[in-house]
Amino acid sequence: MDFNNRIFHRSLSSSSQGPALSIYRKGSAPSVYGGAGGHGTRISTSRHMVNYGSDLATGILCAGNEKMTMQSLNDRLASYLEKVRSLEQSNSKLELQIKHWYEANTPGTSRDHSAYWKQIQELQNQIKDAQLQNARCVLQIDNAKLAVEDFRLKFEAERQLRLAVEADLQGLHKVFDELNLRKTDLEIQIEELNKDRHLLQKEHEEEVKSLRAHLGKNVNVEVDAAPGLNLGAIMNEMRQKYEAMAQENLQKAKEQYELQSETLQQQVTLSTEELKGAKDEVKELRNSCQSLDIELQSQHNMKDALEHTLEETTARYSSLLANIQRQLNFLEDQLVQIRMDTERQSNEYNILLNIKTRLEQEIATYRRLLEGEDVNTDYLLSTLEEGDIKKTRKIKTVVQEVVDGKVVSSEVREVEEMI
C-alpha cells in the first residue's frame, strides 16, 4: 500500500453539524490513528496531527502495518453499521408505535361517526313522526271543532223545531179549551131546549085538559062545519121535528167533538213523540259534545307533552352534538400534534439516513485507499455543515356551537410556538 506523498484527514462527529471529510496532499509518509469505540479516526503524518471529536479515546499508532489498519477500520465500520441498524430499528419501533396509537385513538369514520349520524337520523325521523302525529292531532281537532259546530247548528235547528212544536201544542190546547167551551154551550142549549120542550108539553096538556073540561060542561051543538085542526098532531109533529133537530144537532156536535178530539189527540201524540225524539237527540248531542271536549283536552295535553319532549330531545342532542364537536376538535388537535411529531421524526430519520449515506461513502473511500487507489490531486469529498434551523408550529383551533343543525357561534384560536 502506497502512502508516500499523501495525507488523509478524517473526522466524525455525532452532533447536529454532521460529519466532514477532507483530503490534503503532504510531502511526508502517512500514519493511521484509530479510536477505541468507533467515535473517531485520523490518518496523518508524523509531523502533523489533528483531533476531531470530543470523546476520542487513546489511539493506537499503526505505521506501515496494513493488517492492523484494516482491523481498526473494520471495527469502526462494524460499530457504525451497528449504530445505523440500532437507529433504524428504533425508528421502525417509533413508527410502529405511532401507527398503533393513530389506529387506536383516531376516530374512524365508518366506526364512530356513522353510528352518531345513524342515531341523529333516527332522532330526526322520530321528530318528523312526532310532527306528523302533531299535524294529525291538529287536523282531528279541527275536524272535531267542525263536527261540534255542525252538531251545534243541528241542535239549534232542533231547538227551534221543539219551540215551534211547543207553540203548536199551546195553540192546540187553546183550540181544545174552545171546543170544551162550545161543548158546554151546546149541552146547556140542549138542556134549555129540553126544558122548553117539557114546558110546552106541560102547557099543551094543561090546555087540553082545560078544553076538555070546558067542553064537558057545555051543551053539545053539532054544526056542520069544516073540520078543525088537530092540535095534538100538530104538537106531536112539532115535538118530533124539534126532537129530530135537537138530536141531529147533538149528533153533529158529538161527531165534531170526537173528530176534533181525535185529531187533537193524534197531534198531541205525534208532538209528544217528536218532543221525546228531540230530547233524546239533544241528550246524545250533549254527550257527544262532552266526549269531544274531553278528547280535545286530551289532545291538547298530548300536544303539550309532545312539544315538551321535542324541546328536551332537541336540547339533549344539541348538547351531544356540541360534545361531539369538542371531541372532534380535540382529536383534530391530537392529529395535528401527531403529524408534527411524525414530520419531526421523519426529519430525524432523514438526517440519520444522510449520516448513514455519508458513512458508507467514507467507508468506500477508506476501502479504495486501503486497496491502493492512487489519488493524484487534492479534492474535497464531502462537506456538510448544518446550521441552526428554527422551526415554528402554528395550531389553529376552531370551536363551533351547533344548535338544531345550525352554527350559532364560531371561535378561531391560533397558537404559535417554537419547536
Image (tube, rainbow, N blue to C red):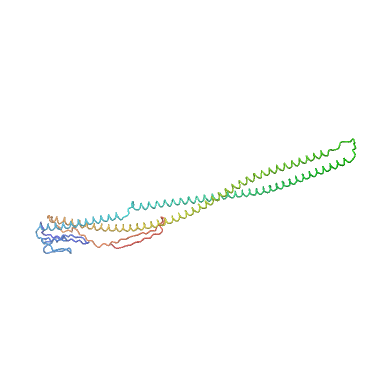
Which quadrant of the rendered structure holds the N terminus?
bottom left
Residue reaching furthest to the top: 224
Between 216 and 196, the one nearer to me in the picture:
216
Direction from residue 162 to residue 18 in the image, left or right: left
Which quadrant of the rendered structure holds the C terminus?
bottom left
Direction from residue 11 to residue 336 in the image, left or right: right
Q: Position of residue 39 (x, y in %)?
A: 17, 61
Between 127 and 243, the one nearer to me in the picture:
243
Direction from residue 237 to residue 144 in the image, left or right: left
Between 219 and 360, the one nearer to me in the picture:
219
Q: Quadrant of residue 203?
A: top right
Q: Is residue 399 above or below residue 240?
A: below
Total of numbered circles in the picture? Answer: 0
Q: Position of residue 87 (x, y in %)?
A: 21, 57
Q: Position of residue 19 (x, y in %)?
A: 19, 60
Between 136 and 296, the one nearer to me in the picture:
296
Residue reaching furthest to the left: 64
Direction from residue 341 to residue 65 in the image, left or right: left
Q: Position of residue 9 (x, y in %)?
A: 15, 61
